[in-house]
Amino acid sequence: MKTLQELARLVGGSVKGDPRTVVEGVNGLREAGPREIAFLTASHHRRHPDFATEAGALVVPPDLEDLDGPLLIASNPYEAFARIAQAFASPPFLETGVHPRAFVAEDALLGPEVRVGPLAHIGKGCEIGEGSRIYGSAYLGSDVRVGRHCLVHPNATILDGGRLGDRVIVHAGAVVGSDGFGFAQDAQGRHVKIPQQGFVQIDDDVEIGAGCTIDRATFGKTWIREGCKLDNLVHVAHNVTVGEHSILVAQVGISGSVRLGSRVMMGGQAGVVGHVEIGDGARVAAKAGVGRSVKPGEDVMGIPAVTQKEWLRAYGDFRRLPRLKEELRRLEKRLLQLEGAVKGQDDD
């Protein structure tokens, strides 16, 4: 339970109305009750100016400060609402302490208030920081380091030597530290495995979606840097570095030894060939196939990926193909008619 004034301080906003308005949770505009706060955008209000809600308070941008009722006014209301939602959120329930059906190696070190669920496996030499939660059937191999206040969800796997910073979230079914796909080919075309002897480092405030796979390095480390967010079913190959605060959307695939800068955004099902660099702030559209390095701030799309301007020009030409085809048919017919007329004149 918090007052509207407390929430405004939390997000750096201002209050219109009674600052003592009590807020007990967050919800959508239609679902919110009189003791909950909801989020309203200017665009939504323009589309539905007669909207009705039972929310006890609203988070709004400055151009909606004339609305009636208790308001929390924020320059970036979407971000403010996210931070407010965090203030009311709590992790999924897990019993205090270590469940009797969990396995914890004798030399593993568990910090204060660590919780371990049933059938979880905490391997030899592991260290788990204060307040972290390891849910049922999660697997931590040998010498894994987990920072403070992390969540490792059911059936997630952190293999030997993995390093997780603070406040990392690993969702169900993710695999961190599986072998990189490294093989040499002999004279008979057989594939000889290259042992993968590196590790994976996950920095603070990273979230790894369900079913993601992040491969250990051949040597050195695969590195997911601070603040990155990986959607479900993302694959990061060996020795990749993903820069700070980058976002990889579902089914993105990144080949080995790629370097992503900070704040890179990659749309769903985009793929990157190995050993290239994607610069700071670059954006890769959904389904793009990146076969070259991308400059900082560049937007690319298509297969193979080209700049947005090039792709839009090519797409415009593609859409004109049916008309051009029809025009060619008319010209061909006209040419045949002319050739027939010339031939008739020659026969005369």
Image: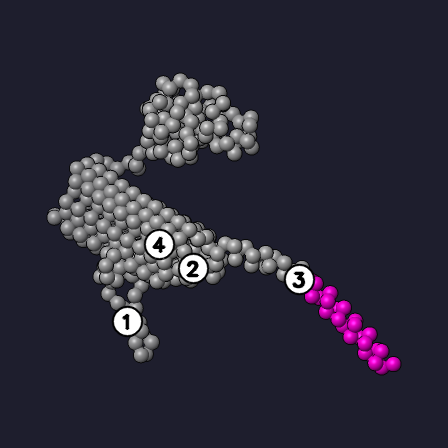
Position of 173 compared to 120: left or right? Answer: right
User: Which residue is situated farthest in the front direction here?
Assistant: 296
Alpha carbon separation for disc pair 2 and 1: 28 Å
- Cα separation, mark 3 vs mark 2, equals 30 Å
Q: Are marks 1 and 3 in contact (CB under 8 Å)?
A: no
Report whether residue 333 is seen: yes
Earlier in the chain: of badge 1 and badge 3, it is 1
Residue that badge 1 annotates: 192
> Which residue is tagged 2?
290
Q: Nearer the viewer, residue 109 or 8?
A: 8
Q: Considering only order in the chain, which callout, 4 or 2, is on the residue closer to the N terminus?
A: 4
Where is residue 174? Give x, y as percent. Answer: 32, 50
Which quadrant of the figure contains the N terminus? top left
Determine which residue is flagged by label 4: 260
Q: Secondary structure at mark 3?
A: helix
For residue 135: magenta? no
Which residue in the rendered view is the most extreme toward the bottom? Answer: 347
